[in-house]
Each structure stands twice: as C-alpha cells, then as structure tokens.
Image (cartoon, coloured by chain):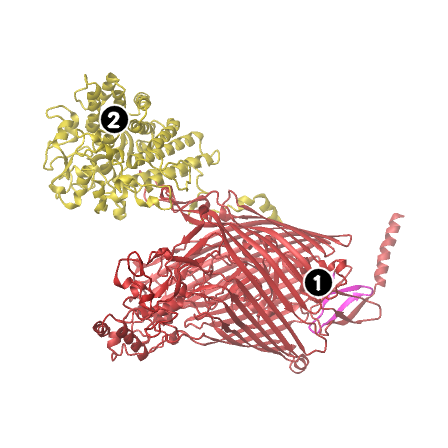
Amino acid sequence: MLNTLLFLSCGKEFLNVSPKDNLTGNDYWKSEEDVDKFMVGIYKTFRLITMGTPRGGTATHRIFFPATGDFRCAPILRTSQSSGGGRNYLTHLRQNNINALFHSDYNYFGFTAIPKWNDFYKMIQAANIVYHEMDNMEEGLISPASIARYKAEAVFLRNLAYFFLVRLYGDVPYYTEAYHSKAIGRTNMLEVLTKGIADLNEQYKNLPWTYEDPSIVGNRAMRGAAITLLMHMNMWMAGFTTGDKVPYYEAVIALGREIRLENNNSYELLPLERTKEIFKGRTKEGLFEIVQNLNYGETFSLSSPYSDYFLRYPNKHIGIQRSYLYYEPKFMEELYPIGGTDKRKNVWYDEHIYNTSGMMQCLKFLNVFNEEGEDYNPDDNQVVFRYADPILLEAEALAELDKDSEAREVVNIIRARAEAPLAVSESGDELKDFIWWERVRELIGEGHFYYDLVRTRKVLNSKYTSATMSVDAYNRGGWTWPIHKDALIDNPYMTLNNYWN
Amino acid sequence: MKSFKLILFMLNFIVIHAFAQEVTVTGEVRSSTGGALQGVTISNQTTKRVLGSSNNQGQFNIKVDVGTKLLFRVIGHDNSTIDIVAGKTRYVVTMRESSTEIEETVVVGYQARKRETLTGSAVTISGKEIQDVPVANFTDLLQGKVPGMNVQLNNGTPGMRGSVAIRGISTLNVQGSGDDAFLTPTSPLYVIDGVPIDEGTNYEYGFQTAGPGISPIAMIPVEDIEDITILKDAQATALYGSKGAYGVILVSTKRGKSKIPIVQYVGQAFVNTPPNLRQVLGGVNERRSRINQILMNDTSYNAALDLINSTPLLADSLNPYFNNSTDWQSYFYRTTMNTSHSVNISGGDQTFNYKIAPGFYNERGIVENTGFTRYSIPMNMQYRPSDRFRMFVNLSPSLAKNSTGSGNAFRQTGVATSANTSSLAPAPSIFSGSMGALAALSMKNDNKTANLNSQVEMEYSPFSGFRLSTTLSYNFKVANQDRFLPEALNSNATEIYSYNDRLNTLYNRNMISYTKELMDKHILSAYVFNESEVSKFQADVMQLTGTANDQFFAGLGYSTMNALGGTLKGLYERRTLGYAGNLTYNYDSKYILEFSYRLDGTSTTGSANPWSNLPSIGARWNFKNEGFFADWSALEYGMIRGSWGKNIIPTGSIYDVYGRYTSDTETYNNQPSVSIDMETIPNISLLPQTTTMLNGAIEFGFRNGLTFLYENYYKQSDQILRTKKIANINAFGNVNTNETSLVNMGHEFIIGYRPKRGNDSDWSYSLNLNGAINRDYTAALPDDVRQLLVQDNSVYKQSILYRLGINALSNVLLHYRGVYASDDDVPINPLTGLRYRVGGNLADERFFRAGDPIWTDLNGDYILDEKDFVIVGNSQPVFTGGFNAFVQYRKWSLNSQFFMTFKRDVLNNALADRLRNYSNPAGIDGAGALVPIEGLDIWRPNHTDSYYPNIYDFRRNSFIDPFRYDQTLFQEDGSYFKFTTATLSYNFDREMLSKRIGITSARVYFSANNILTISNYSGPDPELVSAMGRDSSAGYPNRRSYTVGFNVQF
C-alpha cells in the first residue's frame, strides 16, 4: 500500500530510466557542457567535409579548398614533379573540365566527396537541433545570455553550410526546422541566400566580438565571422541577382563599417612579418579558422592543404625537388609587377616567384612540421575568413556604388600593411579591377579565387582566367559542381545539376 | 441500571453459547452422478467461515454448532446447503453437476469471475487435456483447441515452441530476406499465477537468436498446470495493459486441495522418431544420373566427354574418395528414447494447503547433438484462516539444459547443408574434410538456463464485499551458452564462445475491490489496482580463438589478438507502471455492463509522455434468464455479448523518440564532442501502436448437451511502427513513422456435444469442433502510397508487397503457366521476329525453347524481366481449426485431437533447392544430393506435356534459370489436416487398488503425437514453414512421438 502511494506521487520519475549504454536525447541537453560538446561536434563535421582526416582511408581524403576555391579555372601549371597521369586532375581543374575529373579515379584526393552534400546537411541538421533544443531546455539550467549565444552560433553554422552549398551547387534544398525528415526539392539559390541573410541578421549580434579564452579565438563563431559571412552572402546575391544590386552593396558597406569600426579592438591586421602567426591561427586577424594541431593529434588529410602544391625540398622531403605547381608568369607579374614594391612578394614567396620550372614556392602557409623535411604538410589552421577579407569586400562594394575615394581609402588599408604603393587616382572600372586583383593577391591560397571569378562574372573574361566559360555554360550552371545521384533516392522532388550530366 | 442491563446482555451471550452445543458431524459428498467429490469447501453460511473440506473419498469430518447452516462449494457443481440438526451426525450431501461451463469461474483482469458474467472473450483449457503428451512447451498442445489462436509447430528443436498468433498478425514488418525472412514477433502476454512474464522480448522468433533461446514458458512443467485461459478480445485483455494487446494467456498451476496428503506420480517414457527422410540417389545411381544428364544434354558429344573426363567425381570412379554411396541423412537424424517424471506431493484444505512437485523432463532431439533437459521443483502454499485473510506463497526454481548442435534455436543450417552432400563423397571423417558435417556432429554446445520465480500474495477483507490484496514477485533468470569448436574444424584454431545473460524482474500489484449487492438483484462491483514492474537485462559474450589443445575448453587462447568479448546490444532497464479500474454492473445475472480503464506508462518511450490510455466497454445479455424464455426447456442457457476496446502498444525505443547521443572518438581543438547518431532520426511525435477491437458473440447450450458459440471480431491495428528511408538531404538515414495500418477480421466458432449420460451407462463421449476464419488487409502505408515493395536482394528474390486493400503480405513472383511443348509454342515478337526471351544481353541461350517454363509476359514486350512479376498469394492461413473426440467405455478412454489449416500459400524453397541440384551435374564442391525425380512430371523430349520444365538442360540453366525461387511454380497450397494426438488410457479399479496395494488411483495410457498429416503439399511438412510461409530446407523437423505413461496416486 505504501508502494501505491509512492508510485502515485512520482509515477513519471519512476518511469524515467537512463540507459547504460548510450545517452538519449531525454538525458541530454541538461547543462551548458552538453550544448558545448554538441556544438564542437558541428565544427568537427565541418572539418571533416573540408579538410578530411588522415585516418580511415581514402574515403576521408579531401581536396576541398584547393579544388573548389583555388585551382578551378586558375592559371596553374604542372611541373616535372606532377607530370604523371595521376595528377591530371590539376589540368582538369584548370580547364574547368569537371566531367573528366569524375571519369577518372582520383579518389585519393577526395574528389568523390565533393558531389556528396550529405555532410553539409549533417551540419545543418545538427545546428537546427541545437537551436530547437535551446528553446526546449528546462529553465534555469543555463543563462539566457548563453542560450542567445548558442542559438546565434547555431545560426552561423547552418548559414555557413548553406553558403558553402550554394557556392558549390547553386540551388539547394533549404530547411531550418530541427529533425527535418521530409523529401523536398531544391530552392532557388537567391531565395536560400535571402532567407539565410535574414536568419543571420537576426542573430549575429548575439555573438561576441572575440573570446577571453585564447584557445577558441578564431575557431568558434565570432561576430566578425558572422559579419564576413553576411558580406559574402550579400556579394553573392549582388553578383547573381537580376534585380537591384544596390541594397546588397549597401548592406556590405554597412557591415564592413561595423566590423572595422565597432570591433572593440578585437581584430587588426598583423604586420606581415608575423605571417606565420596569422596562419598558425588564433590571432586578432583570424575571423574563422579550422583547427589543426599535431599536438592534439588533430591533423588534416594529406590531400587537403593548398600548401602541399607550392612547396618543395627543403620544405618537403628530399624526393620532392620541385613544387607540384607554379602559376603562369603572366599571372604572377600581374600580381607582383617586376620591380614593384610589395612586402607580400618577399614574405610570401621566395626568390623563384616567376620561375617556371617548379622552383617557385608559396611560403604563406609554412609552419611547424611534424619532422624536418618530411612529406608532411605544415601544421597551420585552415583560414576560412580573415580580417583582410571583409575589408576588401567593403572596398569592392564601395567601388561598385562609385564611391571611389572611400573605396580607395578602404583598399589602401590592405595596401598599407603590405607597404605597397597606395591607390590614389584609380577610379571606375580601373578601380574595380584594382580591388579585384588586390583580393587575388591578398587571399591567394585561401579558397577565394574561383568564387570571386564566378560572382563577378569575370570567369567569362579571358583577362582574369585561363579557362573562360561561355555565357551559355555559365547560365546553365557550368560554374557548379555535379550533385551525386544518391540525392534522388527517396526524394521525388530532387533534380541534379544537369550541366554535368 | 445501565451497567446491570449490560451484564445481563452479556450473560445472555454466554447462555446462548452454552446452549449452542458443538457436535462432530461426519458425512459424504457425492456428485449427482454418484461419484465421491473431493476438495469440496465446507463453510458456515452465516459467518462465511471455512470449516473444512471433503477428502479424497468425499468424506468429511467437522465440528460444528447445532443449527448451523453449512454451505458446500466446489467448482463444476451447484452450491448445496444442509442444516445441522441435533441428534444427527452423519449427512450425505448430493451436489448437482453444473451442467455447463457457464458456472465456472475465470480469472480475468486478476479477478476471479463467474463465466456467466464475462463480457469479453475467454477460453479455458483444463490442464488435464494436455498432459498426456510429453512436450517441453505447453503452447504446442494448445494447437487446435482454441478458435482464433493459431499455433503452428514450425520448429521442432527440443525446448523451443511453435509460433503463436491470436486473431491474426498484428504487424506487417518483415526482417531478413529469402528463407530467413521473418515477421516481427507479436507474442501474446503470459500471466503465470497472476504474474505477467515477458515472453517475447529476449526470445524473439528470429533466426539469429544469441544464447540458448529457452523461453521462460519452456521452464513451466506441463504436469503442474491446473488450467490455461486464453483471452482474445480487447475487453478481456484491456486490464493487462499494453503488453496484452496481442492476446493474453493465463496459466494457473496446481494447488493442494486434499486434507490427507496425496502423492501423485506421473511417469512417461516416449520414443521420438524423425519424419520420413527424403529419398536420394545413392552411389552408382547418382553417378549414372549425372553422366547421363551430361551426355544427353551437353552442346555436343565431345563437349560432354570432355566435361565428364575433366570431372574426377564422375570419371575417377575407382578412386576411393569418389567411390562411395554415403547416406548423409543417416548421420544426422536418429530415433531417441526419452523419459519424463514428475511427483506431486500436496495436501491441505481451504485453510492451509501446500504443494511441492519435483519434475524431470528429458528429450533428446531427432537431430544428432541436440536435446533438452529440464529439472523443476514448483512449490506453493496457501494459508487462509478465515474468509477475511489469505496468503499465498509460490516458489518455482527450474533449470534447463539444452544443446542446439551447430545450429541455433531455430535453424540447423549446418545439418541441412551437410545432408545435401553428394552421396559419392566419403562419409564424414576428419580425413575427408567434411567439416560442416563434423561440426554438426561434434561441436560441443552446452546451454544452461536457470529460472527462479518467487511470489507472495496477500489478501485481506476488513468488511464484507471489500478486499485489499497485494502481490509481490521476483523473477530471476540466467542463461548461458558454452560452445566449443575443435581445432580440426576451425582452421587449426579452437574456438570458445561463451554467452551469458541475466534477466531479473520485480513485480508488484496492489488491488482494492468492492462488491455491493443491492435489493437482491443489482450487483455492483468495482476494483482498482496499480501495477509496477522493473526489469533488467544484460547479455555478455566472449569469444576466444586458439586454446592450447582440444582438451582445454577455457582459459586464454594463444591468439589474444583475435579474442572478442563484451556486452551485447540490447541491454536494458525497463519500468512499467499501470493504474487500472473496472466497474461491473450485474442485474439479476441477466444484464451485465462493464467498463474498464487502464492508464499505462512505460519507460521505453521516455519521460515526456509515457502514458497511454486503454478504455474498454462490454455488455452481456443472458437472454435465457428472461421470463419469456422460461418455457424453452430445451435451451439450457443463451446469451449475447459484445465489447469494444482499445489497446495501445508503445513501440520503438527511447532512442527512436529522442535520438542516440554518442561521444565522438576524435577531438576538435582538443575538446571532446558529442554527436547525435544519424542512422535514425529521432521522432518526437512517435505514436504508440493502437489496436482497436470490436467483438460480438452469441452462445447457447441445450439440455441434451449440444453447445454453440459464434464470435465475430474486427481488429484494427493503427500506427504500426515502420522504418522508412529518407532523402539524403536530411542527413539522417531512416525515420520511424506510424503510418502503417492493418485490419484483421474474422469469425470463430465452437460446436460441442457432450450428451448427458445416465448413471448406469458404460459409454460416454464428447465431441468438440472449433475453427476460425481470419483475413487480414493492409489499410494504410507510409507517405499515403498505395503499395510498397520490400525488395529481396538475396538469392531467393522473393520480394514482399504490401498493397492497400489486399492481404498484408503478398508474394511477388513470376507467373508460371507450364512448359513449352515445342519450339513452335514460343511466341514470336511480330515487330522484331524474335522469340520470347529472358532479359539481359542478347544471346542464343536466352531465347525460350521447348522444355522451358512458360512465364507470363505481363507487359507484352517479349522479354522476361522485372516488369513481369505478378502479385499472388497469402502467407497467412485463412482457416485454422481443431476437432476433438473423446470416448469412454467403463475404465477405458480414447481421446483424439485433430488440427487443420486451410488456404495458405507456401513457398516451397525446399523443393526448389532439391531440383536446383540438377543444374550442375559436374559440380564438385557444390554437388548436392540428387533426389529421384522419376515421380515428378518433368519435361522430356518424348514427354512434352508436363508440369515441370526441363531439368536436364544444364548448359542453359544459368541463362534461363527454370527452377528459380521467385515463381508461382513453387507457391503451393499449404493446407493440411493433421491427426495430432491420440491417447488410449485405462483407469484401474479404485476399490481393488486401494484395498490391495494402498494406491488410491492409477492410470496407464498410451499416446501418439504428430501421427499423420494429410496434405496436397509436395514438400515434407506444410507446417514446418516460417511465419512468412516459406519452407526452408534448414528447419528442424517435427518429431513423431509415442508415449507410454503411468499416473499413480497414493
């Protein structure tokens, strides 16, 4: 009888059993630590998508940033070190010959992973789940401020994923509800971005400018990263919209001002001599980075970094006497006119900058090695967004709106740091070109080149690329990547990227 | 003055007491048919105090006050009263046999109820009816006894039971494929002496069962069963909560009821024989058959010679390795001699009784190296000093040992493969390399299952009509398996597999009941109870490779790198909690109206919303009790009843609802992370499966002993959990949804005839016929689709289709219409001028010819491919029923039981397997045993009008595949009529026995089980098929047993 009373009073608690073998959602979401660990998992998914891991065989190899950002349609040329057929993918990338890329087996470099968008949707689902669970957590477990910050972080992560998806595939399915299980078709790219911009605009101010804990500076969502993402999304909108582009440029300018003028000294451009620190990560210049650290046992897959292609002995083992790639001298001369002064030329390159036999090295990403001279890649973080990026975007937007003097002023921030001649009289298209080339110069090897070509439609113009795209190809989605046909399974609304079929 | 009055008043009592003189009365209780009645409860009708009971000879001896009215009660007879008058000390009481079962009591919803007040559907089987055939599981003997309960003995492994389904299937989820496909189990709930036993969870009907596979039901000795009640409709099962949704089987064990202790012994000796084994071609016959097939059918004579000469099996006939005639089946199947013994020592009366019943059951399987042994000592004790207080204690330890050889609890794959070896190969020995066969024969497989049930029940009635009771039980079960594979059979490394699991269950129930009688005719009774259960399960496994030698079965192996071990998936801690209430209104035993409600909570669905509601309502009209029927003297009773109820079954696990979170192996930024498992998406809105059942019945009996029962039911299972794959943009792989529905409809009937016999008649007999028609329909499918194909990617390609409005599980097969008698009969595509052919690359062999099967070209494109499948068949039986006949002549009696299953489609994969053995006459490794096919109507050049296609054309076999599994040729009607058991028994004359050797009763009997199956089915046994209707060669055949039994009572 006592039992009866006991059970009547606390039936629900009696039925609450925590399984021994795994955690369930019923027991999760009970502390700030739970949220944090789950959030870390999303960053890890992003690392896996973009950088892979050295463990687990070729399935986890990735050539994400070099292939999608730096090499596609870029004036890269192979050297004697990379003349074998196994490196043909470099030529395919240069020539935008994506079909050839997938007709041969380059899976060692992780090309097969690029058409598969599953992992981006893992990020999105997980971010949506955090957002949803934040609203459902019992009151008092964590502070409202933390909830707001975590929600903003989740929103940043899902929009980061959507932005990457849009840049890869164009139109993509869009959803923000947690535990989404329906089959849906693809949403127009511009609509995805419009929704994403609205979504992120609402939340990004809840993110801190920077963190007190130095270990998470630059690698957990910061307001600067969110602003840069917003600027990128707006620039992509401006590039593709058929309507009025002005509001997007205005938004970019406003965001640029915010990040430059309101950042409470959280961000600054470091002197170029401290390049190694910048790309090692966690500096005031880094806005969003993917962490790599040998000491943590966290390394990227061997095929993922850009630096792999522009280093040779003594920065690689003795068998690699030539870099795998060099840039066309014409291109390098455009970036660094012979005889011109630019500190980047001295710090980021060695004396063989215009060399065509493979002696050229890009020393931008050159940090601690596992062991001297070994065929290991530098232990750098992968920089996704850097403070120089929003500054140049702002300058670009200003130039587009013909605010030339302001544009010059902003671009000269970057020029000044490099101790290069400042822009003084450039205006109109000349200024726009100047800023575009400045972006190439500053952000080379950081996964922006191809996207800058595409969104500014410069990919149609042989002046900027060695593999120009026809207007027809561009309009039919020749700038996208193919989507893996698995997307059609159990989804009657799905279509693939027909250009590549 | 007042105090004086009080003293007088008290004195008055004393005086009365002094006058109420106590006398000792003796007497005898007799049945109206003349026999002595034992165990009749005698109580004081006014005080309700129990005074004693009659002994074995029907005698009683009690002390009682003169003037008392004594009440005599016993089950099966009407109550009787006598008045004790001064001066008379010997009384003879005659109790009229209650002529119908309507007077019996049945325990429904943990409350004993008179059968005539039941509104739900319940069938009771007496333990005596099933105790003459030795079996490990009592459910096997319920076959054909209860309409609507479909028991198929589809597994002959000793200690395992057949499949049990009450009122059709409740799910259409299928796991596995091909031969291994099985229906997700929906086992009924077993309640043993008022304690629910979870039977289904860990002993599911799956082919990959780990561990010994002995269910707790197999731990109950059949001799100890007093009776079994099967509850079928929602009103009867509602009070058992969500676990009762698939039906409830109540078992009560024996209790002591004789004042003088009785010792009863039941001994059985039984012989198990294997069924008829299949005929095979042996030795020279097999070789000639193979050589002939090659010579007659190869592309050219030279090719044939070349093939024969390059096949040592055929050419090298003098080589001792190929010169054999091995009867493989003889190595695996055997006839066994077995015994079972049980002793029941019991005694006591209503006040205090006890029972202890040690038992031993041993059955060696008809397949070598398999068997089952059970030791059990069920004990119980009841103390009931007055009608107000009752205490019952039950303690049942039991231990079972079994061996499943090289197979598991359901399949003997090793035996099946080995028995299908060519007779030309040498007999199993270590030198001939027939490892599979040797493993089946010599693998050590030792399983132990130990079970302890303990239970205490107390009842107290503070005032009349009001009762409080509580039950507490603890059930502990351990099971372990030790398997040892000698090194010669396992690539020179021994293998030890050791499995052990433990399950413990704590159960408590507290009940308050109240019965009130108003104005003689209105009886209102109500009760409420709560029920809680905690159960924990964990299974661990260890596998070691390479011990020092074959004599060491334990310890560390030298190959520690290959050692495996850990806890198996599926460990759990589960809690359930139920609150239930029932209100019954009974007007003059004419109109009965009943409401039940149960609130059920379970931990499996998590804490957010663990509750489910189970309402039910039932009504009954005993129309014979109406005044206007009083004249119908021929009609003894008659009633109509109906019920509606809803049962809710929580499905899925807590992970399905909330997701599974796991710590990741790698860090990020040196921080640990946790991810949600992306295999199955959590579905917060997951709903429990709901079963709604409507039941209606009409029942009547005549004075001449003829009884009828007809029942009709409609059962709708909604929101069945089904796993569905989802688009990859959702990141998760699957989702569990509740979008599937299933409907079962059926009719059930019982016709019984038990003529009243006169006192002087030597003859008596009774007949009972029952049957049930059940049809199932798919009512809804996920995403509102009209049909859903479950693709079978195994070699069998036997896909399953669900389509709205038709039977739930349909086969998808090629339509076989016979054989092309000649090449000219093959249709020609008028557009291309090409003959009808099988799909694939254009090749000469692919065009149909004479002797090839005619498969309907459904889409008319003259190419046979996946577009030509038809939807046919129903793997679930439409009609099941049983017939029982009992004849008694003086001391002799003969009882026979029949069982039938009609309208069921079986896929005869066993036959297909055998015919496919002809596809490669030169095969060495895969050379299977050849069955003689002279008896089959097979196409030959000189016999073109045949039923089966050309079997000999082995060169084109891989192109045409005439004996493919996925065709209607192998879908056969699996109807059968089975003579289940016959028992002939003789009761020794009691007078003679007790006088001469002091034995109160003795009975000897002979019984046979699984006697004869009559069927058109071409396979070995139409019953030995999976619940999906697939006949696999790897099943464990059902034994036939002959028993000599002896019951004696001291």
Looking at the picture, tell me which residue is in the foreground, B1042 or B565: B1042
Residues at marks 2 and 1, CA–CA distance in whole angstroms: 97 Å
Q: Colour of chain B?
A: red
Please identify the quadrant where the C terminus of chain A is shown. Answer: top left
Q: Residues within 10 Å of mark 2 (few under 14, many from 20)?
A: some
The residue wearing badge 2 is A388
Q: Are marks 2 and 1 on the same chain?
A: no
Q: Position of residue B666 (x, y in %)?
A: 32, 44
Looking at the picture, tell me which residue is in the foreground, B345 or B168: B168
Task: Look at the picture and state if B1004 lies above or below B621.
Answer: below
What chain is colored yellow?
A
Q: Position of residue B464 (x, y in %)?
A: 73, 54
Q: Is residue B739 magenta?
A: no
Segment colored magenta: B49-72
Quarter of the image for residue B65 reads bottom right
Task: Look at the picture and state if B537 lies above or below B374.
Answer: above
Circle 1 sits in a helix, a strand or a loop, which is it? strand
Q: Nearer the viewer, mark 2 or mark 1?
A: 1
Q: Residue furthest right?
A: B1
Evaluate if marks 2 and 1 touch, with contact meaning CB atoms under 8 Å apart: no
Looking at the picture, tell me which residue is in the foreground, B320 or B968: B968
The residue wearing badge 1 is B637
Q: Residues within 10 Å of mark 1 (few under 14, many from 20)?
A: many
